[in-house]
Amino acid sequence: MRAIDVHVHPSTRGLDTHACNYFRRDLSEVPQTADGFADAYLQHDVTALLIGWHPSTVTEGAHNSNEHAMELVTNYPKAFCGVLASLDIHSTDLPGVARYAEELVRNPKVVGFKFHPPDQRFYPSDKRFYDIWEVLQAGGKPAMFHIGFTVLGANTPGGSGIGLDYGRPIHLDTVAKDFPGMKILAAHPGWPWVEETVGVVTHKKNVHVDTSGYLAEQLPELFQKAIGTRLQDKALFGTDFPYVDLAKALVSFDRMNFKDTVKEKLLLANARNLFGLPAE
Ligand SMILES: [Zn+2]
C-alpha cells in the first residue's frame, strides 16, 4: 500500500462548491458516484478514512452522514478503511450524544471522530463537552479537530458567521492536558497559528497533526521543517479530498526531500499506529 489518507470527505455527498472554487477544483474532475470515488483511491493503492460530518454551508442535495460513510466502507473495504464519525455537538441532550458516542466507539467501522469547531461553533475546551471527551478517551479512538483557517464562509460578509477563534490550536492543548489519555489529531497546519500548532503538538504527546488542505510544497515552511524532523512520528498524510486532489498530493510528497524513512512514517506508519490499523 502506498499511503493512508486520514482526511477524506466523501465526494458523493455534501460537496461544497465554494470550497471547490477556493481550491480551483474543476467540478468535472470530482467523482460524484460511489464507484468513481472508490476508484480514485484504488487506482493509487491508497486507503482512506472517511469523514461523516456534513458542512453547514451545503444546504442542497443529500446530506453526508455517519451512515453514508459507513455504507461506503462496507461496499469498498479496500478503498476505505474506516469512518471518522461526527457528533451533534449542539444537541440539547448531551448525555444522549455521549451514549451515541459510546455506541460508535464499539462499532468496528468507526476508527475515530471528526469535529469542525469553527463550523460547528464550539470551543473544544468548553467543559460542557467533557463527558463526551471522557467517552472518547475511554474508547481509545482518536478525535480529529479542524484547526486554523477554513474555506467555509471565506470571503463572505462576516465569514457567514463562522469564527476562526474556535479553531485555535491552543484549545486542543487544554483538552490534551485535561484528557492525557485522549488521542487528538489536529487537522491542517492551523494557519495563521502554525507556530502554536507546532508548539502544542511538540508539547502534548497525545496530540498529532495531519497535512491536509495543502500540497506538500505549499505547507508553511515552519511546519514542513517540523514534520521532517522532530514531529516525524506525529504527522499524518491527509489530503482533504475532494478539495485537494489525491494524485497531486502524492506526487507532491514524492518530490519533497524528506528521508525515505520519514516519508514512510508520514504516509503510512504514523496513521497505522494512531488508528491501530493492520499492516497489509
Ligand atoms: Zn476537511
Image (spheres, rainbow, N blue to C red):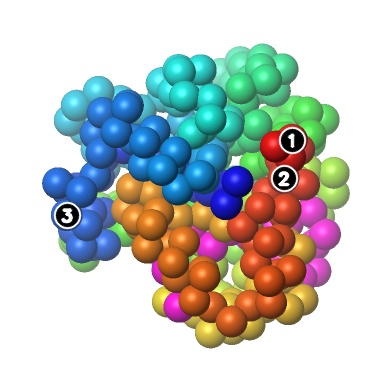
Residue visible at 29% across and 33% down in the picture? 36
Which amino acid does the dot numbered 1 rest on? Pro
Q: Residue 24 placed where, x, y %? A: 20, 63
Q: Check if mark 2's residue and mark 1's residue have beta carbons within 8 Å.
A: yes
- Label 2 vs 1, first from the N-terminus: 2
The answer to whether residue 210 is magenta is: yes
Label 1 element class: loop
Residue segment shown in magenta: 201-217
Image mark for residue 26: 3
Give the tally of numbered discs. Answer: 3
Q: Check if mark 3's residue and mark 1's residue have beta carbons within 8 Å.
A: no
Which amino acid does the dot numbered 2 rest on? Arg
Q: Quadrant of residue 193?
A: bottom right
Mark 2 within 8 Å of ligand 1, using the beta carbon: no
The quadrant the C terminus occupies is top right
Label 3 or label 1, whichever lies nearer to me, is 1
Query: Against 202, is 115 above or below?
Result: above
Does the image show residue 170?
no
Q: Which residue is mark 2?
A: 272
Q: Residue 206 placed where, x, y %? A: 79, 54
90 vs 272, nearest the viewer: 272
